Amino acid sequence: MKCEQPGCSGTVTDGYCDVCGMPPSELASAATGASSAPAASDGAKCAQPGCSGTIADGYCDVCGTPGGTPASDAGSVPAGVAGTASTASTSHRIQSAAIGSRRAGSGSTATRRVGSSRTRAARLGAGITTIPPARAIDPAKAVQTNPSVPEDKRSCANCGAAVGRSIDGQPGRPEGFCPKCGTAYSFTPKLKSGDLVGGQYLVAGALAHGGLGWIYLARDRNVSDRWVVLKGLLNSGDKDALAAAIAEQRFLAQVEHPSIVEIYNFVTHDEAGYIVMEYVGGESLKQLLKERMRAHGSYDPFPVDQALAYIVEIMPAFQYLHDLGLVYCDFKPDNLIQVGDAVKLIDLGGVRRIDDDDSAIYGTVGYQAPEVAESGTSIASDVYTIGRTLVVLTMEFKGYQSTYLSKLPDPATTPVFRDHDSFYWLVAKCCAPDPADRFASADELRAQALGVLREVVAARTVGTSTTSAASVSFTTPAVSTARIDWNQLPSLRPDTTDAQYAWLVSLAPGEPQERLADLAKAPEATAEVHLARGAEYLLDGNGSATKEQAAQLLALDPWDWRALWLQGLASLQSSDWADAQASFSAVYQQVPGELAPKLALAVACEAGGQGDVAEGLYRTCAQTDAAYVAPAAFGIARLRAAAGDTDGAVKALDLVPSTSRGYGEARRLRADVLLAGSDKDLGRLGQALTSVDGVRLDTVEREGLTARILEKAIAIVGETGPQPLNIGPYAAQDETLRTALEASYRALAREAGTREERIALVDRANTVRPWTST
């Protein structure tokens, strides 16, 4: 049968033209859909062990594996391959446009390096949690013996149509032309073991087939026979296109960061182009997830702390790229490899310049930001992919490529969000619909993720020693047993990059009115100037003027959450509890890794009658950071005591360690709580008296407390009679207690400030002393 393609002189043999490789027109539709391993239809159950997902649009809505992929996952990218693209990826090309985020250029300009990938991965958990090291991968064992691409994974690189599939029982051809668009395809390796590429790289064999073709393992004969990976370039069949592709991607060779796969070279061989890159021996997070799923028999996501630790560790690499003016574009679990006890970002195929409005964009459905199709990529779109990756790592995210393509599940019905409120707000800010509402930089995201990580670990390890970590945004809180006032909450740390910071530091201290007069002369009303004015108005008792400064700051920068903090303080001062709650809640959502907004919100909720909410926030603060234990414990104690729960209040106060500057106050309050809640319980009175043992108190404080305890003890013994126990060092007998109380009264009399007070105390001592027979 003669080929029907225009201008072709070939004949159809075994269902394909022996010249152009095209099937006859009547077989084209069959060729497009046929396969030796038919792809599972939409709605079918995923074949991966332990996965509960279903096939939607050809891919599992949970693990992302293509429909029809056998349980053995044959043909998938093996562990340890740097720069590969998962066959489950639905990467696509999108025409770029202008960057949409107004805050895309507001990231850090400081590059943070994270040290050698060979360092101990105790650092992988940021010293907060522990991540099991990934197994070592032998590069030689990763080479495929009979490299081939399963027919169900053969698709046209241009239009995505199925190619090279079986027809009527005849195996599909691994090379030919797409019947839909005519683009040439080839699924046979172009390099074989023993080939020398670029006169330097000795090929060991094929590792895997990715989105851009085969990926090979080779030895670098010029550099100590180190293992390298060779990855094909697009358009390699066109010399001009090949030269352009190499020139276009040479900037990747400038990327040098210990947490990013290194590009060594660009070479050509037999008119094909290859990127030469570092071989990374490890397992991708997607592979680790699949291993957990197989071992558990059902979907088994990473613990939240482990997922956060991975993200915290890789954020400096993102900041490094952004500082170079580059965006990664296609972040997902497939592209983050755990190597021993470190992580590495692989597959730089999607990396592009931030100001690139022309080249193709590579992204993956379910991870890519919704605005990319129209506005192009940006730092904000990278942040979005990080947030989506966090969700996939921590939950069975059904429908992330369909129902929840551009939104998150309801936190009220999503266990991981319901149990970890701060984690939810971290992800929600990453994935905000408006790019301008996301974290402005990878450094900012890392700082908040680190705070959430500490909180998650603390909640899991309640009762262990609490550490403290300095915040870049807030000072430490004050310690008070009374209801916390606005001026006892943490203060904002100044932004030293503000244009008026140096001028503000030069101002002399003074009363609020004097300071406000000086601040009125500021050369420029910057953010720090508005914050300084607002703080002085608060000290002057003018909350409305403080709120006006907050409004002016928001007009200057609608994303400056510090204005909401200022507004919340003013509302606390004026006892507007509802507005204070709203303001501090908004701050909490913007900086979910910070404890100060949680403490402030707890204070506002306590004052506003929402004790349950307040207590939960206080407990989070107390168990997460040592600097917050005392004020949070006092808050819990106030709430428990008000509810008549003496034991609960005492238990809260016992959280304050002896190393805390609030320890003495906590022991005094403990004694007061036990005294107030003792009723007829002499045992509690004894605990009250011993609560202040070892605490530095002056005579009036110590003897005054002792006197109040003994007075109540005498009253109880008078009703019930002597008891076989001690109240501190005193036996629970009327005569012993009266003698002790007399001594306390006389000690207080010696310290009295006036003659009248002294006489009154001596009279009380004489009245209480026990009667004698003489």
Image (cartoon, rainbow, N blue to C red):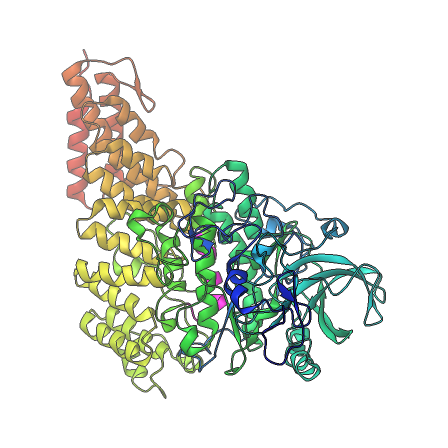
Q: Residue furthest top?
A: 773
In the picture provided, is 409 more to the left or to the right than 224? left
Q: Say left or right for 422 vs 639.
A: right
What is the x, y in percent for residue 434?
Answer: 35, 71
| Residue 703 appears in the picture as rendered | no
The magenta segment is 439-452
Between 760 and 295, which is closer to the camera in this rendering?
Answer: 295
- Residue 490's place in the image compared with 237, above or below, is above
Residue at (46%, 56%) from the top-left corner? Answer: 58
x then y, percent, for residue 24: 57, 68
In magenta stretch: residue 388: no
Is there any visible trace of residue 627 in the rendered image? yes
The dominant secondary structure in magenta is: helix
At 65% from the left and 74% from the top, the residue drawn is: 252
Image quadrant where residue 45 sits: top left
In this rendering, position of residue 300 left or right of residue 545? right
Residue drawn 20% across and 33% down? 676
**Identity of the residue furthest to the front in this view:** 1
Q: Quadrant of the C terminus?
A: top left
Splitting the image into 4 quarters, where does residue 271 fall?
bottom right
Nearest the viewer among 195 and 437 is 195
Q: Position of residue 398 (x, y in %)?
A: 39, 51
